[in-house]
Image (cartoon, helix red, strand yellow):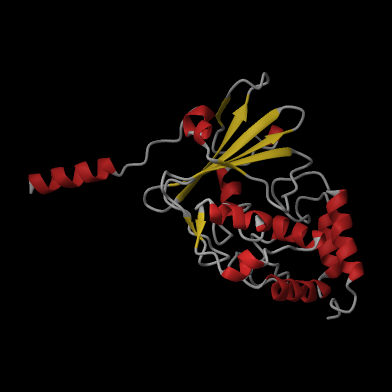
């Protein structure tokens, strides 16, 4: 019995997840293998952003399911936010057991070091709590929102040629997905919740999540927008935290984004007829 207990304890220790590093530099960001920029960015009150991805050596992303890429365990991703200087860098990591963990690192005033932010975040500078991170990222098929077939359309062939992504459907390689700017804006800012699998699946604002059939999905999204046209625009224009959409990560209305959606709704009257 003691031997079995000892073996159990040794096994548990071997699979124990170390705590989040106290400093950003300790997360492995210097070893990030790929910088990337999605086609359609999430609005973050005008912040400039940079993004990086790390895959363990010899591993690849399985893209057989276009809307639910399978990232290898050990994958890490970072997103840096700047407004006049670096504010924070958000961190996502896939653990050995297949789960994901999330953290934010706050940069000091000199921009020389970023330290782990507290779990409740730092609202004064816009750093979200870990609960807020989960609210958005766990609503999607995979938590890395900006690294997908729709978001990386023009880069898919290069990523496949480099062996970073495998099993992409041939149709996506032959005709990489592209969305109209207004629909792309809604996809990036709302699609992680408003989709068939997300927490707001019952809401009729079903966005273009099906990268395997982007044209058909876009048409479905456009038709569903017609029934909620006024409500969508009201929420995008609102600064009220109880009304606005998206509800997290922003305090400032994105006038350019609203204009993109207005243009989308006005330019496709026939397709948008309920």
Examine the rendered structure and indicate whether residue 180 appears above or below residue 271: above
Q: Residue at x 70, y 45 (%)?
A: 249
Examine the rendered structure and indicate whether residue 102 appears above or below residue 219: above
- Of residues 10 and 178, the one drawn nearer to the viewer in this rendering: 178
- Of residues 30 and 243, the one drawn nearer to the viewer in this rendering: 30
- Of residues 215 and 144, the one drawn nearer to the viewer in this rendering: 215
Q: Position of residue 193 (x, y in %)?
A: 64, 61
Q: Which of the 4 quarters of the picture holds residue 233?
A: bottom right
Q: Position of residue 189 (x, y in %)?
A: 72, 55
> Which quadrant of the rendered structure holds the C terminus?
bottom right
Q: Residue at x 50, y 66 (%)?
A: 64
Q: Which of the 4 quarters of the picture holds residue 125?
A: top right
Q: Residue at x 79, y 76 (%)?
A: 223
**Residue closest to the far front:** 161
Q: Which of the 4 quarters of the picture holds residue 216?
A: bottom right
- Of residues 36 and 24, the one drawn nearer to the viewer in this rendering: 36
Examine the rendered structure and indicate whether residue 212 appears above or below residue 87: below
> Can residue 90 be spotted in the picture?
yes
Q: Position of residue 46 (x, y in %)?
A: 79, 40
Left-right relation of 73 to 2: right
> Can residue 121 be spotted in the picture?
no
């Amino acid at each position: 019995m003691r031997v079995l207990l000892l073996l159990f304890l040794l096994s548990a220790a071997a699979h124990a997840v170390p705590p989040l590093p106290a400093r950003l530099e300790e997360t492995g960001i210097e070893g990030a293998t790929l910088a990337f920029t999605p086609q359609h960015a999430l609005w973050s009150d005008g912040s400039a952003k940079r993004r990086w991805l790390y895959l363990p050596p010899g591993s690849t992303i399985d893209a057989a399911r276009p809307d639910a890429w399978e990232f290898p365990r050990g994958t890490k991703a970072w997103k840096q936010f700047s407004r006049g200087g670096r504010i924070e860098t958000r961190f996502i990591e896939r653990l050995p057991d297949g789960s994901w963990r999330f953290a934010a690192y706050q940069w000091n005033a000199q921009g020389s070091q970023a330290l782990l932010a507290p779990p409740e975040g730092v609202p004064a500078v816009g750093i979200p709590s870990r609960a807020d991170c989960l609210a958005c990222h766990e609503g999607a098929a995979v938590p890395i929102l900006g690294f997908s077939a729709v978001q990386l359309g023009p880069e898919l062939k290069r990523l496949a040629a480099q062996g970073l992504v495998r099993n992409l459907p041939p149709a996506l390689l032959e005709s990489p997905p592209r969305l109209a700017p207004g629909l792309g804006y809604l996809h990036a800012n709302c699609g992680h919740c408003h989709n068939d699998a997300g927490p707001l699946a019952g809401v009729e604002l079903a966005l273009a999540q099906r990268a395997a059939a982007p044209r058909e999905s876009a048409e479905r999204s456009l038709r569903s927008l017609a029934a909620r046209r006024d409500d969508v625009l009201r929420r995008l224009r609102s600064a009220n935290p109880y009304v606005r959409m998206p509800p997290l990560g922003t305090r400032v209305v994105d006038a350019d984004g609203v204009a993109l959606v207005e243009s989308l709704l006005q330019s496709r009257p026939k397709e948008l007829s309920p």
